[in-house]
Amino acid sequence: MEWRHGEGESEMANHMCDRCGGALVSITLRVSTGPRTMHSCSTCDHRVWEAEGDSTDLEGVLDELSQTVLPRQNSRAR
Ligand SMILES: [Zn+2]
């Protein structure tokens, strides 16, 4: 996963999807260790997690969210 170091100040602008360049929907969740922001692409369902503005390990986030109820989206029946 490449993370481009922004030219200039880090800003909380709308993120773009790394895959399709679509708009990401940001959802902030509060866990025991702090706020976690999930950027979910409505186009290709790509998800990026952030912890207090920094990218974090997805596994760690999922472990933290194991106790958090997440709304299910795009449930694919197969
Ligand atoms: Zn996308």
Image (tube, rainbow, N blue to C red):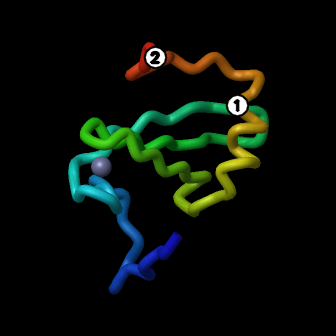
Task: Look at 31% across and 55% down and name the residue there.
Answer: 17
Specify the amino acid type for callout 1: Leu
Q: Which residue position holds label 2? A: 78
Q: Percent x, y for residue 1?
A: 52, 70
Task: Look at 44% across and 18% down and name the residue there.
Answer: 75
In the picture, residue 12 is in which quadrant?
bottom left
Specify the amino acid type for callout 2: Arg
Badge 1 or badge 2: first in the primary sequence: 1
Task: Look at 49% across and 41% down and name the residue there.
Answer: 38
Numbered circle sitting on residue 73: none
- Is the CB of mark 1 within 8 Å of ligand 1? no
Q: Give the secondary structure at mark 2.
A: loop
Q: Give the secondary structure at mark 1.
A: helix
Work out whether residue 40 can be spotted.
yes
Task: Look at 72% across and 48% down and name the residue there.
Answer: 59
Category of crowding for the residue at label 1, using alpha-carbon neighbours closer than 10 angstroms: few (below 14), some (14–19), many (at least 20): some
33, above or below 78, in the image: below
Q: Percent x, y for residue 36?
A: 59, 42
Q: Percent x, y for residue 24?
A: 31, 45
Work out whether residue 13 can be spotted.
no
Category of crowding for the residue at label 2, using alpha-carbon neighbours closer than 10 angstroms: few (below 14), some (14–19), many (at least 20): few
